[in-house]
Amino acid sequence: MLRTSSGSAGSDRRRNGCHGSGRGAWLGAGKMAVTGWLESLRTAEKTALLQDGRRKVHYLFPDGKEMAEEYDEKSGELLVRKWRVKSALGALGQWQIEVGEPALPGAGSLGPEFIKENNANPIFMRKDTKMNFQWRIRNLPYPKDVYSVCVDHKERCIVVRTTNKKYYKKFSIPDLDRHQLPLDESSLSFAHANCTLIISYQKPKEILVAEAELQKELKKVKTAHSSDGDCKTQ
């Protein structure tokens, strides 16, 4: 069985099998949190680079954390977001991908037979659109009615399971946590095609407004071109 966490199989309906609502505590704090997160982005030290059709932005926060984002130059769509923090001894850790194609662990040192076998396992990644947070889980061959996708309000996460008990995964939406916004079951949907489960969560208006404000802020950042030098995160 393919699992990323413990749990039992549930119904193939996305609304079954999860805990009850715990939304109330998040409603009042949402607006204040949106403002707070935007302010932290505004005050972070930022550098930007235009390279290969992507606008790459590096953020350095006062606590030493780093965030790197990549946007499509024409559409403005977010392609990559990753984080890096320092260890207790001050050493830089590995980049942790939040949005974008996952790196194959140790692919450079593995033989082609191992990589081929590894590629048959489910591959989880997040790839957003303008209006939705979106996740893709590749290499899931089961028909759509086998899957259950629902919100667990108690743990503030989305839970994916199959009725045949072959796959289980739960994951959070960091954007909603940063803005202290509740998860809404009605915003969640999923589809299945070509052995890929596609899970979508409609972005709340607070997120859309915050993203638009951030883009205005990023326009103020002086952008270098790849011929001028390299970005800090490259």
Image (cartoon, helix red, strand yellow):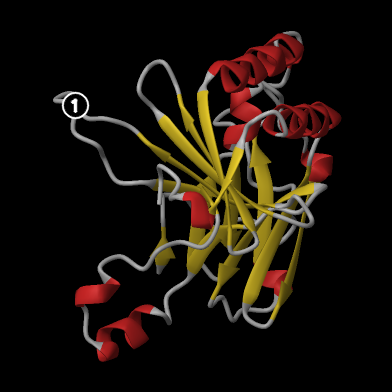
The image shows residue 172 at horizontal and vertical percentages of: 56, 39
Question: Residue 54's x, y, as percent?
Answer: 62, 56
Q: Is residue 208 left or right of residue 195?
A: right
Q: Amino acid at mark 1?
A: Gly
All told, the count of numbered labels is: 1
Kindly identify which residue carries mark 1. 90
Give the quadrant of residue 134. Answer: bottom right
Question: Of 234 and 175, which appears nearest the observer?
Answer: 234
- Give above or below for 133 relative to 121: above
Badge 1 crowding class, 10 Å Cα cut-off, few under 14, some 14 to 19, many 20 or more, is few
Above or below, 95 against 148 in this view is above
Q: Position of residue 64 (x, y in %)?
A: 35, 23
Looking at the picture, tell me which residue is in the foreground, 187 or 22.
187
Q: Residue at x 63, y 74 (%)?
A: 196
11 or 191: nearer the viewer: 191
Would residue 153 be visible to someone looking at this image?
A: no
Examine the image and state in which quarter residue 91 appears: top left
**Quarter the N terminus occupies:** bottom left
Q: Residue furthest left?
A: 89
Measured as percent of width and height from the top left, residue 77 is found at 73, 52
Residues 74 and 33: in front is 74
Left or right of 198 on screen, residue 114 = left
Asked if residue 110 can be seen in this view, the reply is yes
Extreme bottom residue here?
113
Residue name at image x 42 percent, y 67 percent: 2
Residue drawn 70% across the image and 58% down it: 199
Q: What secondary structure is marked by label 1?
A: loop
